[in-house]
Structures are given as structure tokens and as C-alpha cells.
Amino acid sequence: MLNLQLARKYSRAIFEIAQEEDKLVEYGKELADVRAGLDSVPEAAAFLSNPQVETKAKKELLAKMFAGELSANVSNFLMLLVDKRRIALLAAIEDEYRGLSNEARGILIADVTTAEPAGEAQQQAIRAKIAQVTGKKVELRLHEDKDIIGGVVVKIGDRRIDGSVAGRLETLKKELLANK
């Protein structure tokens, strides 16, 4: 719980800086790139999270890994995380930042699950329908799950819309059992 609160505070700080400079997308991409870079080299992430490693060595590693790729503010932000021993929160900070950035830009993230890979036309239709209902720009995160048999399941935040064949069969089963 404490880590989530800290992640929110740090993400809010970098978000406010990005908003002031009108660089929400750029800073978001940089944070995502750093996260992906550290995720792709687990040894580096372990090194940065190790409390026995000197702060100077951690900063040097980050500087070498991302030399020339980061803006001054994002680079300084990462160094601050190292100084405050919060670099392990980077994934949570990046998640929170992405949420704040999307909200500020009026973008809604929808998790869409289909039984088969969704084609471009199907994606466009889903995106258009959600945008029509919500009045926001929509980005889709696509998932596949053969268990839904057919149709689509859309999850937006904590709201779930089940238009799958499996969901309809389950509803029908409940109705039939209730009428016994």
C-alpha cells in the first residue's frame, strides 16, 4: 500500500513537469523505454534494486544504459529515484504516469478479449463504438482467449461488458437452473 502511494506521488511529480512543458507523450515514452530496458536486462534491475550497491554505481549504470536517449528532466527524475532508493517502483510509477497522461489527453484504454485475433476492421468497429458511447478517444489493448468461444469481452476500468458466446451460455445456464 505504501509503495503504491509513493508511486502515485512520484508519477504525479513527473506528470506535472511534463504537463508544464507540454511533453506528456515524450516523457511517457521515455519512462516506458526505461522500464522496457530494465525489464529486458533483469541483472540491471536487480543491481539497481540492491541496497548494498552504492548510489554512484547505480547512477553510472543508468547513465550508460540510456545515454543520449532521455531528456534532462527524465534523466534527473531517474537519478532522484536512485537517490531516494525508489528505483524499484519504476514500473508502478510508469503505470500511474500512463494513466494520468491518458486522462489528461482524454484517452480511454479498453482491454478487448476475442477468441481469435481481431482484424483491423473489427478493431476499428470496436474503437468507434466505445468512442461513441464514452465520447473519448480510445486505445485498445488486445487479448486472445479461446475459452470465450466467440464474440468479444470489453473491460474499461472496473466495468466489464461481456458479449462472448461463453458469457451468453453461462447466463442461459443460470436462467435455466433458476427456473427449475
Image (cartoon, rainbow, N blue to C red):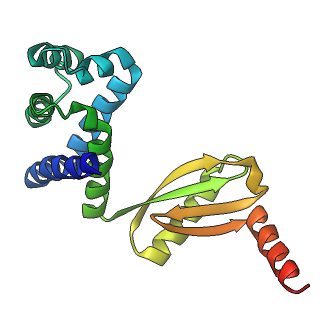
**Count of labels in the image:** 0
Q: Is residue 66 visible?
A: yes
Relative image position of residue 127 (x, y in whole percent): 52, 63
Give the residue at x 63% y 62%. Answer: 153
119 displayed left or right of 131: right
Give the residue at x 69% y 68%. Answer: 163
126 displayed left or right of 31: right
Location of residue 151 with respect to 6 vertically, above or below: below
The answer to which of 156 and 87 lies nearer the viewer is 87
Relative image position of residue 60 (x, y in whole percent): 13, 14
Give the residue at x 15% y 18%. Answer: 63
Relative image position of residue 8 (x, y in whole percent): 22, 52
11 displayed left or right of 141: left
Viewport quadrant of the C terminus: bottom right
Location of residue 24 with respect to 110 vertically, above or below: above
Given the current orientation, which residue lies at the most extreme right position?
A: 180
The answer to which of 82 and 64 lies nearer the viewer is 82
161 displayed left or right of 95: right
The answer to which of 105 and 165 lies nearer the viewer is 165
Q: Is residue 121 visible?
A: no
Q: Quadrant of residue 56?
A: top left
Location of residue 36 with respect to 14 vertically, above or below: above
Relative image position of residue 86 (x, y in whole percent): 19, 35
